[in-house]
Amino acid sequence: MTERVTHTIEKNKSKLMAIILVILFLSIQLLFLLKTFTLVFIILLGLLLGILFMAERNRLFVWMTISFTVGLLAFIYGDRLILEVNVTHAEILILNRILLFLPIILVAFVVYKFNRGVLSFLHKPSWNENTKLPFIWSGFWELSVKRFFIIGTVVYIVILLILGVNAGPLNWHIVGNIFFFSILNGITIEFLWRSLFLAQIRMLIGDKSAVLVTSLSCAMFYYLLGFSLAHCLIFFVAGIFHGGITLRSNSLYPAMIWNICLTITFVFTGSIPLLALM
């Protein structure tokens, strides 16, 4: 009986610590938005001092948070340097996404050093797994991941066709840039948030909570890029579905394809001003 009570207490302590670490992770991003960098360094210092007293999976997430913060600082600094380079505005957008490999490489290195799978979701989707429409884990219609993915893709394409009718004249150069930027965005965004972070955060707070946290974190990053709150809300909601299908299919590829479709739609509607800058 005593052992069971002790085990329960230790489990609750570990869960509480995981929740605190996730809140601090999101708080750091919020402080970036508020440009309160002093508090960011205070939080990082506190994490470094407490890391010796944490369980291994908590230590992993702390180092992921630190590496992500360092990578984000490098991303912001690099983005400012790009503005000083004599390139087109469209090329600036593409270089901006290439800079996102900085936090990706740092976070992936930490995951690798802890002997965790860096490529956890980079394999063929489990198409026959069950999911539910419309909310993946709950809904009125049970169907396979493959059908859910097809429905989601069709919805994205229909929205693209409706909103992209007035996009103006296109040529192969413009179409090529759109697809290159969209693929680059889909790979970087989804790999960082829906693979590296989602795979580890789910071990701390569970699948559904991890999907919400990574979706919120990703939306905050888009806000840091200058998107409006309305657009970031769209990214947050879309991120929930992207994270959900990643976990249900055990693969990152469906989310990447959805992200590419969403990015193309945003380009055609002018939310990402790639067309206007060509």
Image (cartoon, grey):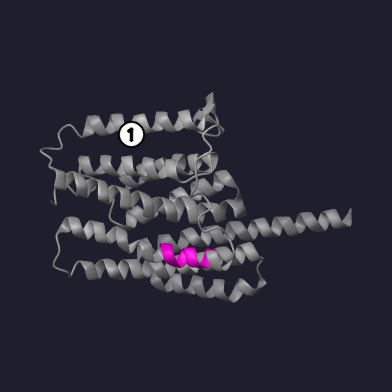
Which residue sits furthest front? 124
- Residue located 33% across and 34% down the image: 156
Image position of 115 (left or right of 269): right
Q: Amino acid at mark 1?
A: Tyr
- Locate residue 13: give its quadrant: bottom right
Which residue sits furthest right? 1
- Residue located 35% across and 49% down the image: 186
Which residue sits furthest top? 140
- Locate residue 155: give its quadrant: top left
Residue 20 coordinates in the image, percent (x, y) = 58, 60
Image position of 194 (left or right of 270): right
Evaluate whether residue 273 shows in this view. no
Neighbourhood count class around disc 1 (C-alpha, 10 Å): few under 14, some 14–19, many 20 upward: some
Image position of 150 (left or right of 23): left
- Indicate whether 187 appears above or below 43: above
Q: Label 1, secondary structure: give it.
A: helix
- Residue located 52% across and 75% down the image: 45
Badge 1 is on which residue? 156
Which of the pair 226/270 is nearer the observer?
Answer: 270
Residue 206 coordinates in the image, percent (x, y) = 60, 48
Principal secondary structure, stretch drawn in magenta:
helix
Residue extent of the magenta highlight: 104-111
- Residue located 21% across and 40% down the image: 268
- Locate residue 53: give its quadrant: bottom right
Residue 210 coordinates in the image, percent (x, y) = 54, 49
Residue 77 coordinates in the image, percent (x, y) = 30, 70
Magenta stretch: includes residue 107: yes
